Amino acid sequence: MRRVGSQWVMSMIVLAIAARVSNAQSVGARARALLPTGPVRVEVLELWSPPRLNELSLRLQRAAQANPAWWQEHVRRAPPGRPLPYDRKLGLTEGEYQEFLRLSDSVQMRPTRTETVVIERTTVGWRFGVATTLDALRGLEIDTVRNEVHCAFGNLLAAQPIRASPAQRATGPWSGPRWELEAVDSVTRTGTRAAFAVGRHEVTGHTVIYFNAQRVASGQLTTQESLFLRVTR
């Protein structure tokens, strides 16, 4: 699923750079329990949100695009794990911004279609095979020896695992290993960032697969792939 700009709301609302080889066995054991091999049917989940939230989000997006340097600095200065502080440059009144934050709790991930992924064992881990119907995942490899993920966007290194939390309102609590790439030049605001994770949904017990990657040029999003999948078998 390729979208430019349409997944901006997800990054607004919602989701150790190097890994030691000694962690590879534990990562491999966790991944083995989560990834069935062979053809697997998956549900593609996408964000659903109320129309009013979409309206407010669009205005926020336009404000951020109109002043990207300010936007990046405002995000950088925000306290970790807390909503962005209100500023008139957000393009909303303070009351509208509070409404936006309240409505953000109503966002849900809902299944929109079913696809097939083919998970193959390799000598060092797993790979999504050529018969995978999702372009973004086809050829992606999980290397549990190096504790890396290799994909078309580059090499993702081990990061802090996803931990189940009540804050995961849209998806429901889930946890599992995660890998990330952060290669955006702070001066030119050009580069690539990507994240991949596989985990277990606490309520349903289903395996979930997450992939999100962007390329930016001069602060503008040029390419984005975003997937949240639920394995149905």
Image (tube, rainbow, N blue to C red):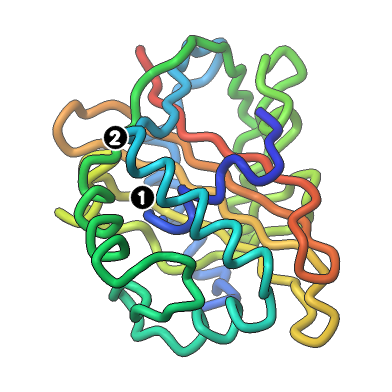
Q: Which amino acid, by three-letter code, is at mark 1?
A: Gly
* Disc nearer the start of the sequence (2/1): 2
Q: Which residue is mark 1?
A: 176
* Image location of residue 161, percent across then percent down: 39, 61
Tell us which disc is closer to us: 2 or 1: 2
* Image location of residue 6, percent across then percent down: 60, 40
Q: Is residue 22 left or right of residue 160?
A: right
In terms of image quadrants, where is residue 211?
Answer: top right
What residue lies at 68% left-to-right and 68% top-to-bottom? 66
Q: Is residue 153 left or right of residue 79?
A: right
Q: Which residue is mark 2?
A: 108
What residue lies at 55% left-to-right and 65% top-to-bottom? 158
Q: Is residue 145 left or right of residue 112?
A: right
Q: Quadrant of the C terminus?
A: top left
Mark 2: secondary structure: strand
Q: Which amino acid, by three-letter code, is at mark 2?
A: Gln
